[in-house]
Image (cartoon, rainbow, N blue to C red):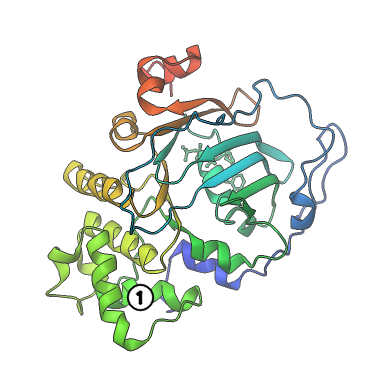
């Protein structure tokens, strides 16, 4: 890793796999039982209090329409979170959240600040365990296979499930070309030199940046605009060929024009990779996502999903009055 690297998504390489011991001793009752190791974490704690809102899951046949795919297109992957609870020390921040994120569907996670959206997103590619005091319960299934299963390495989850952060985080002094391929060695993906040029072009094209940078691939990534840097980060993630792309408020630092370009990029990528995005922008959720999940944490309580489903329905006919209040801007 270059000494100037400040990329959050590269830190995991130094983290021991599946080793998890909270730095603080877990308190006695009334704190509910908590998992003390990642091995234990795959089984929910036994005696949790009843959630005020039961976790919800899609029923069979309830999925929004997946993106149309050409017959030659690669098979898209789906992600399913089952009964996810999460803690920082003894602070429980998510309570048995279940959500199906079907292949080819862009899922938006919306909700007020502090209700656990980013924590949930980071659990989806095993970044939550980087926080020393963090623990979790539940399962995350990628095409039916639990990414927290002992058989799987941490790096495998990162390879298959990419992440784009709120703030664009390219290596600023590294060339645009090298930024795109930077994720390969860090996730152990080998591409021979002959195929690197092709991979760089394909990744930048998929991220909607190729035409703007094809004549200056050897110039530093830090010389690009904020929106271009974010697309460079998307290209870096795509170069590893993830099945899932997680995006944590990817446009919050960008101007409206750059935001629109990223949204167009997302809609084009929908045919190739399953996307989950955290956004505070209700218009953005409506523009890009086909499915939406509304997170909420009552005062002093962990976050839950209050309602989820087809995005248009959530915004036009929400079933829960709290969803209605949120999507119409009455709070949050
Ligand atoms: N590293 C951490 N250590 C301790 N507590 C944390 C940590 N990260 C988040 N939390 C707490 O977990 C809860 C959920 O935070 P999280 O960032 O997931 O919410 P969010 O819905 O994504 O918020 P926002 O929309 O403001 O980004 C909050 O109470 C927050 O203070």
Residue name at image x 21 percent, y 43 percent: 260
Is residue 119 in view from this perspective? Answer: no
Q: Between residue 277 and residue 56, name the one nearer to us.
A: 56
Is residue 205 in view from this perspective? Answer: yes
Residue 238 vs residue 19: left or right?
left
Spot occupied by residue 45 in the image (x, y as percentages of width and height):
80, 40
Work out which quarter of the rendered image holds the C terminus and state it. Answer: top left
* Residue positioned most to the right: 28
Q: Between residue 89 and residue 318, name the one nearer to us.
A: 318
Residue 310 vs residue 37: left or right?
left
Residue 170 against residue 128 in the figure, above or below: below
Q: Residues within 10 Å of mark 1 (few under 14, many from 20)?
A: many
Residue name at image x 39 percent, y 81 percent: 191
Spot occupied by residue 89 in the image (x, y as percentages of width and height):
72, 46
Spot occupied by residue 67 in the image (x, y as percentages of width and height):
34, 43
* Residue positioned most to the front: 71
Residue 40 against residue 138 in the figure, above or below: below
Snapshot quadrant of residue 202: bottom left
Spot occupied by residue 252 in the image (x, y as percentages of width and height):
32, 43
Residue at label 1? 181
Residue name at image x 84 percent, y 37 percent: 46
Cβ of disc 1 within 8 Å of ligand 1? no
Mark 1 falls on what kind of element?
A: helix
Snapshot quadrant of residue 125: bottom right
Residue name at image x 48 percent, y 12 percent: 321
Q: Where ligand 1 lies, by image quadrant? A: top right
Report how many numbered discs are placed on residues in the image: 1
* Residue positioned most to the bottom: 193
Q: Between residue 317 and residue 24, name the one nearer to us.
A: 317
Snapshot quadrant of residue 56: top right
Q: Between residue 72 and residue 77, name the one nearer to us.
A: 72
């Amino acid at each position: 890793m270059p000494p100037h690297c400040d990329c959050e998504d590269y830190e995991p390489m130094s983290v021991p796999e599946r080793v998890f011991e909270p730095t603080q001793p877990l308190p006695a009752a009334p704190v509910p039982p908590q998992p003390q190791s990642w091995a234990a974490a795959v089984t929910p704690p036994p005696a949790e209090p009843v959630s005020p809102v039961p976790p919800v899951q899609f029923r069979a046949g309830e999925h929004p329409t997946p993106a149309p795919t050409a017959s030659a297109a690669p098979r898209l992957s789906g992600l399913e979170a089952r009964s996810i609870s999460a803690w920082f020390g003894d602070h429980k921040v998510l309570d048995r959240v279940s959500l199906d994120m079907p292949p080819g569907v862009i899922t938006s996670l919306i909700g007020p600040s502090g209700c656990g959206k980013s924590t949930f997103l980071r659990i989806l590619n095993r970044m939550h365990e980087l926080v020393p005091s963090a623990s979790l319960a539940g399962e995350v299934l990628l095409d039916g296979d639990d990414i927290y299963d002992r058989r799987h390495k941490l790096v495998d989850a990162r390879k298959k499930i990419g992440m784009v952060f709120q703030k664009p985080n390219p290596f600023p002094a590294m060339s645009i070309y090298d930024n795109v391929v930077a994720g390969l060695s860090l996730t152990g993906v080998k591409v021979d030199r002959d195929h690197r040029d092709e991979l760089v072009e394909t990744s930048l094209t998929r991220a909607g940046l190729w035409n703007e940078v094809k004549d200056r691939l050897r110039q530093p990534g830090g010389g690009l605009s904020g929106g271009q840097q974010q697309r460079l980060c998307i290209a870096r993630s795509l170069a590893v060929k993830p099945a899932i792309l997680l995006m944590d408020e990817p446009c919050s630092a960008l101007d409206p024009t750059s935001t629109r370009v990223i949204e167009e990029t997302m809609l084009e990528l929908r045919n190739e990779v399953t996307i989950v995005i955290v956004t505070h922008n209700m218009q953005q959720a409506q523009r890009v996502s086909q499915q939406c999940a509304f997170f909420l944490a009552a005062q002093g309580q962990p976050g839950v999903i209050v309602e989820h489903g087809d995005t248009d329905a959530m915004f036009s006919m929400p079933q829960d009055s709290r969803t209605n209040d949120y999507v119409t801007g009455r709070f949050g």
